[in-house]
Amino acid sequence: MQDQPGFQNPEAALSAAKEGDPQAQFQLARAALEQGDEDEFRHWLQQAASQDFPPALFRLGIWRLTKTLTPEEISEAKNLVKQSAELGFMNAIRGMVVLNARGAGELPNWQQALHWFKIALKLNDQKAYREAALLLQDQEDGLTNSILRHVAAAGDTLAAYHLGCLLLEGPKSIRPEALFWLGQARDGGHVLAARELAPYRGEPAAPPEEPLQPLQWPIIEKLVSALEEPLTPYQSREVLSDPKARIVEGVLAKWECDYLIARAAPKLQAAVTSESVEKGEEASEYRTNSAVKFWTMNQDLVISMIDRKMALAAETPVDFAEDLVVLRYQGGERYYPHCDSFLPDLPEQAAEIERRGQRIRTCLVYLNDDFEGGETHFLYPEKKIRGERGSSLVFENVNEEGDADEHSVHEGLPVSSGQKWLASKWIRDKSQVLF
């Protein structure tokens, strides 16, 4: 069940809303939000939610999550989302997956996330099947390809891309099908598909010869139920002693890097800093790149798994990390020298430290390596660092006393050719489940 078609006539919608029609009330709430009338939005949304209208319950819960801080308020907001999910509203079911995986008002609960994820699968949610296929790649030969074929055939661009990449790793006889799916992904706007197709220009592409095979739900359910959080620590090597910085190899696989790039590309906006946000600026003079922040409700189970891998690399509990940010640097773009920690001498940043904690550590994952320039440059001491795709650079922003470390001043040097993609996480000294 998704948002339902509304009334074409605003007067008819208002009349129906006053008579108690929840669909009309929901339509008026959405119209009020578009017009910036929050009071009217809240009024009609609450009216529709009071009648257990699933889209309204979900929207009201999400809206409250953007406004709340206390555990009790977060719990009430989550319960609205849960009510909507229990009524079969797919957006809410996906919401329960990520709210439990990320932790909202309480610690992350991986098993509860899987519980809601399996409900999405049982209701034939194609996005959930795409995520399941990717997360089960190491579980059983052929299963991932089978699931991805179903989802790609239904028009999912990400599924078509990952299926094409996987088939390219197989025998040459199935290359035409691989190129077919990569072509579907390219035509659907996938940001990386043309790159994968380039070495095979002129070779024939052909759709699969065999019809789709039925999905074996009992096998999928069993394997999904056994999906575990990554818990094995990574090995790392020190690259700086002051500030402390280390490289962690093999944090993310190629497909995970590609997944983040593709998810981020359509949502990129001019990157900002905490100072520019405080000033209400839409861009920052200190950085010229683009970025997208994956707020909890924009995540999915794949990104939740990536969250956990980055937390392991950063040697921190996953709930102490801020939401994941993906960064893109094009030719000439850079991030000028800066510190990632907050400065307690500045009132606004002192308040942020008190409320949500200090940014004690930074974890960067290099999502590609087909670019020139763009090194992470530490100024004191002089050190330029560049990692391979999937590796992570982790460095401390504070000294042993917990004070902002001036030696952690660094910059993202300009990219001279190609595009540089990074995944970034700031680690706090407090749990972030209330935010």
Image (spheres, rainbow, N blue to C red):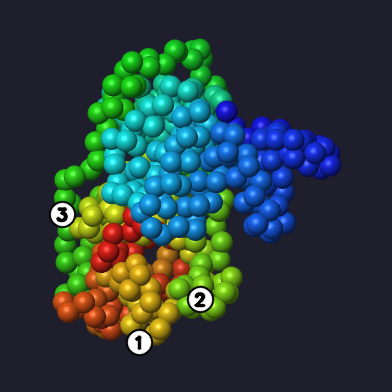
| Residue 398 x, y percent position in the rendering | 24, 76
At 66% from the left edge and 46% from the top edge, which residue is drawn? 44
Residue at far front of view: 19
Q: Nearer the viewer, mark 1 or mark 3?
A: 1
Disc 2 marks which amino acid? Glu
Say whether marks 1 and 3 touch (CB < 8 Å): no
Q: Relative to 40, is 269 above or below?
A: below
For label 2, the residue is 278
Say whether marks 2 and 3 touch (CB < 8 Å): no
Left or right, residue 155 beside residue 319: right
Say whether marks 1 and 2 touch (CB < 8 Å): no
- Give the quarter of the image for residue 435: bottom left
Give the numbered dot on residue 42. none
Element at badge 3? loop
Question: What is the quadrant of the N terminus in the image?
Answer: top right
Element at badge 1? loop
Of the residues under marks 2 and 3, which one precedes in the sequence?
3
Q: What's the distance in space between the residues labelled 1 and 3, CA to CA?
A: 36 Å
The reply to whether residue 191 is visible in this rendering is no
Of the residues under marks 1 and 2, which one precedes in the sequence?
2
Of the residues under marks 1 and 3, which one precedes in the sequence?
3
For label 3, the residue is 235
Q: What's the distance in space between the residues labelled 1 and 2, CA to CA?
A: 16 Å
Q: What's the distance in space between the residues labelled 2 and 3, CA to CA?
A: 38 Å
For label 1, the residue is 345
Disc 3 marks which amino acid? Gln
| Residue 343 x, y percent position in the rendering | 34, 81
Q: Badge 1 local density, few (<14 within 10 Å), some, or many (20+)?
A: few
